[in-house]
Amino acid sequence: MSEEMFKELQELLGENFTTSTAARYAYSSDASIYRAMPDAVARPMNTEEVSKIVKLANKYKVPITPRGAGTGLCGAAVPIKGGITLDMQAMNKIKSITPENLFCIVEPGVIYDHLNNELKSAGYQFPGSPGSAEAANIGGMVSLNASGMRAIKYGATRDYVLGLEVVLPTGEIMKVGTHTLKNSSGYQLEKLFVGSEGTLGIITEVTLKIVALPKAVAAALVSFDKVEKAGQAISNIIAHPIIPSSMEIMDNTCITAANRGIDAGLPDVPAILIIEVDGPIEEVGREIRQVEEVCKASGATEIIVSDDKAVYGLWHEARKSVLPALGGYSPELKIVSLADDMGVPISRVAQAVIGFKEISDRNKVIIATYGHASDGNLHTKFLIDPSKEDDWKRAEKAVEEIYDLVLSLDGTVTGEHGVGMAKAPYMKKERATAIKTMKAIKDALDPNNIMNPGKMFEWESEHIMFSLRYPAEVNFDE
Amino acid sequence: MSDDKKYIKGDKLKALYDQTLLCTSCGYCKSVCPAFKGTLWDHNTARSKMVLAYGLLQGDIPVDDSVVQSIFECTTCGDCMRRCPSNVKTVDVLMAARQELAGLHEVPETMELALENIEKHGNPQGEPASAREEFLPDEAKAKLRTGGDVLVFLGCVASNTDMKVTSAIFKILERAGVSYTTLGEKEPCCGFLNYLAGYDSDAFGKGLLEQIETLNPRPKMVVTPCPGCYRTLHHIYPENGVDLGLESKHILEFFDELIEKGDLTVTKKLEGNVLYHDPCDLGRHAEMYDEPRKLLSHFAEVKEFKFNRDKSHCCGGGGGLQSTNYDISSSMAKARLTEANELEGDFIVSACPACKSMFSNAASDFKKETGKKFKVRDLVEIVHKNTKGKES
Ligand SMILES: Cc1cc2nc3c(=O)[nH]c(=O)nc-3n(C[C@H](O)[C@H](O)[C@H](O)COP(=O)(O)OP(=O)(O)OC[C@H]3O[C@@H](n4cnc5c(N)ncnc54)[C@H](O)[C@@H]3O)c2cc1C
Ligand code: SF4
Ligand code: SF4
């Protein structure tokens, strides 16, 4: 970054602009495997400041990487080409909640849980429910099209974005979408920014649809002695038809981790499903009984049903804790975020889970599988010794095999966590026919390629193990 | 700080290297970290402290003012450790990072000043040693360094800043007929601030031990109203191989025993909503949750903050943060009062002179801003105002 630009940013932002060692290092990583230091961190307080920062970056052709809470798992917020990291966390106002309009308007730095706490008092919710709910920002969620365990019934962030205010890569402020529940007025550009991972502009305001909180909730904790049977139960429930509000699968590696991590007391079996139904009281009672029957017929070994939030809340807490709790699975092995978020058609969940296990055995890498079984979104976590180059190499091979399997099952390489760097080469395979158009859109909006460059279709290698935040370098040319 | 880049030696942090890798960067700790909530900067979160510790160990980053500031912008409240689903020993890592920095004499200036005061005057406030006797009631002055069953270790904060608590302690002991003594100007600083600054703990406890040896009869027990001193006497000295040769208690435990034995009788109950605030050093760090509630329940029906016991929010006075970043530290106290206000609390009772001081300052601002008046009290004051001895 040139001296001139540095001075201009400092003048503009004062204390909210820093090039300190601590800030640059702290902002060099997210929850992914990557590390790359920005040259500076800038923290805007309003849209005008964002616009001025972007104009400067565009003038000096310096990369900008927007960042929310930094909980992304694919390195989308890691500034791989340096430049400025734009920390959006201080733009955290909930501007309005209008249940009578069925929407709320928020700044991007609002934390998911904070928004839902406010909505709750009005009897409403934004039901994305990511595992990272207590930290993740709305801006980050929109940019990755995040969702969570309730997507089967409530959809993903995409389905809630009614309108956006965006600062384009030229610094121009653009409003897209509307303050109405539907519109047919031209290209649905608001959706273009959903999942754009900060490569097309900076989101400075989000109008989000909200939905009423359910009147009643009940859940079942179901044990299986075989993963295949759990998979069969998932398909049988959907085909019945029952649309649960969530249906989570956990394999034994995950169960063990959750029990160790938060003392969850889950049954020690090959696989469990945590199934939740919500809605009017009578319907919930009827549906949870149907869930029980279908699970029994699918070969469940134990079924515990509860409508007590303290009880099923702990099951959800256990499921939410899996990702971080896997870190304590074994002293030498550490959890790394790889192949974390594949989507397959619901009927192929069991096939995928079994396939992942075979890949895990073949490549001698511990792979834990869990996920939102009801919408076919599966997470795996890899446990490796992150200081060993060989472990990384075996892991990458397993990652490749997992993605090949997923694509052969007509799936997607990412259901909710986004592409960033960790899935870039595989996303290019999956979206082979769309890359050219994506690139054309990017070129049109960001002619100087300043917005989060080097990610997604711009990733140049067929490998993903570069610039790691771990003590190993992985060398591929032998 | 000079321009030459400095790097840590690594001897303190090395043992915790594994912990820095165990951290998945999930960010759960951001949701509870008061240092993050107060600044919204990522480099102040517990997560980033793990990241910075890793960077320091790997030699990725040198030690400079910004690194020192980040490592110290923390109350050591320990809520991150409670929240962490991977059970990362966050506070151990950040304390080891502080030790590395202290090894290079890299400690925030304001904290350095307090440490210089301890060196020169025996207390962080820079008061003359004789000031420790100013707030003592006459009865206590008569028992200075005389020996007795119970040694009262007041600690620097109570001695130098809280006349009410200091004098109440001795009035209660007199009332209950306890054989006690106290050290007055000979009372050394316990060393907790040096510990928090990351300085070597070799000298810990030796000064106090020397003083105890001069007392005749030798006390069987030492009691203190300060959770920091309690942690130091009860946990940190033994961990550093210093045995004072007597039992150590927080004074609230001792007062409860006096009530149970009938040496103190409860005369009045408090009127209004009484909230108990768990000090971090007594709660999360010493796991003393039931004892203060039991003592307080003699005087009131104890109401709980929404975040209580191991989930309690810090008052902002911990970890030396008050000296390194007063703004964040006072915003935490204010946030806690806002929680109390939502619960319609009248009394905010704690068992820590630092919590009381933080809340008292915040309460006067709160009153100006909202008109709401809180009664901020130490448990000692409640016992003093609402008990009598056997004969009275
Ligand atoms: C423990 C754990 C559990 C998780 N569980 C889930 C889950 O269940 N479901 C799920 O979907 N995800 C999950 N995630 C992933 C992640 O938390 C979510 O994707 C979340 O939405 C990221 O939000 P963030 O604020 O942290 O974004 P960041 O990681 O900071 O950024 C993500 C992307 O958004 C861009 N961005 C951020 N703000 C803006 C803005 N204002 N304008 C433009 N671009 C912006 C960044 O450039 C980056 O590309 C989990 C992560 C963890 C660590
Ligand atoms: S909660 Fe634990 S694992 Fe998660 S970021 Fe904080 S220290 Fe790391
Ligand atoms: S000890 Fe408290 S203030 Fe310090 S990092 Fe942890 S949560 Fe934040």
Image: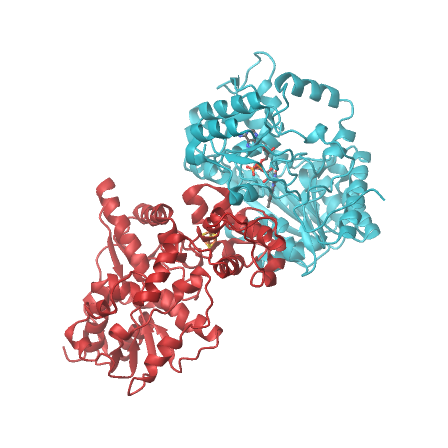
Determine which quarter of the picture holds residue B157. Answer: bottom left
Task: Tell me the residue at 29%/70% (across/down).
Answer: B154
How is this picture coloured?
A: by chain
In-image side of B386 versus B218 (left or right): left
Which of these two is toward me, B300 or B381?
B381
| Position of residue A92 measured from the top left corner of the image (x, y, whole percent) | 45, 34
Q: In which quarter of the image is residue B392?
A: bottom left
Towards the viewer: B201 or B389? B201
Instruction: Examine the rendered structure and indicate whether residue A79 appears above or below residue A202.
Output: below
* Residue B99 in the image: above or below residue A61: below
Image position, residue A287 (x, y; %): 61, 41
Residue lying furthest bottom: B217
- Kindly give the residue lying farthest to the top in the view shown: A185
Tell me residue A458's x, y (percent).
Answer: 71, 28
Which chain: red? Answer: B
User: Which chain's colour is cyan?
Assistant: A
**Which residue is most to the right?**
A478
Q: Nearer the viewer, residue A86 or A244?
A: A86
Residue A194 placement, left or right of B188: right
Q: Residue B125 versus residue A181: which sits nearer the camera?
A: B125
Q: Horizontal placement of B155 versus B60: left or right?
A: left
Residue found 76% across the figure and 29% down from its top? A428
Q: How many labels does the image show?
A: 0
Quick one: quadrant of the C terminus of chain A?
top right
- The part of the image, by quadrant, that contains residue B281 is bottom left
Q: Where is the N terminus of chain A found, in terms of image quarters?
A: top right
Up-down relation of residue B327 to residue A50 (above or below):
below
Say whether residue B284 is visible: yes
Q: How far from the left and from the top, in percent, is residue B164?
A: 20, 64
Residue A308 in sight in this render: no
